Image (spheres, grey):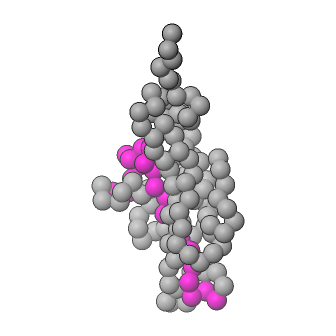
Amino acid sequence: MYQPPENFASQLVADQHCCCFLWKPDGTQASSIFIRKEIWLNINGKGDGLGDGTLYPVFHLYNYLDPSTAHSAYSGCRVNPLDKPYTKLDECLAEAARLEEAVLASGKWVPVEMVKRNQPE
């Protein structure tokens, strides 16, 4: 699985990282698993902050390859509750890898190299 650039977690700016991009076996559709980074304000002096601890990144994981893993019907395929983001990028990446493995095992999605194409005879 592709690793995000170092500044994805370390820079205090909102960002997004695509963990995997897979296709339907017939090539008709593509979708992804991605992580969205938000910057939250530490107003109570607690949390896993960076720098002076007033601002810190949190991560939300989205699985558009298997919407059944979404936290709720209104989460847009986000797999964690809005009020319980991942605070450690490594944990979020590990869960993304687990989800990718599950959707590949289902046979519903494949890497682009595995797409069956109609070849002229």
* Magenta-span inclusion, residue 84: no
For the point 61% across and 60% down, which residue is it?
91
Q: Is residue 83 visible?
A: yes
Indicate left or right for 64 with 22 as reference.
Answer: left
The mark total stands at: 0
Image location (x, y in percent) of residue 120: 50, 14
* Observer able to see residue 95: no
Of all residues shown, which one is farthest toward the top? 121
Give the vertical position of 10 relative to 71 (above or below): below
Does residue 56 show up magenta in the picture?
yes
Looking at the image, which residue sits at the far left? 73
Residue farthest front in this picture: 120
> Residue placed at 64% from the left, 47% from the top?
1
Give the image quarter of residue 15.
Answer: bottom right
Seen in the image, is 109 located left or right of residue 74? right
As drawn, 100 above or below 121: below
32, 54: nearer the viewer? 32
Q: State the image coordinates of residue 39 (x, y, percent, origin top left).
A: 52, 77
- Tell which residue pokes out farthest to the right in this image: 6
State the image coordinates of residue 6 (x, y, percent, origin top left): 69, 65
Which is nearer the eye, 59 or 23?
23
* Picture residue at 30% right of the left edge, 59% below the top: 74
Which residues, given as a range, are shown in magenta?
Answer: 52-72
Please say if 6 is above or below 68. Answer: below
Relative to 114, residue 52 above or below = below
- Residue at 35% x, 60% y: name it: 75
Residue 7 rendering spot, x and y as whole percentages: 66, 69
- The quadrant in which residue 82 appears is bottom left
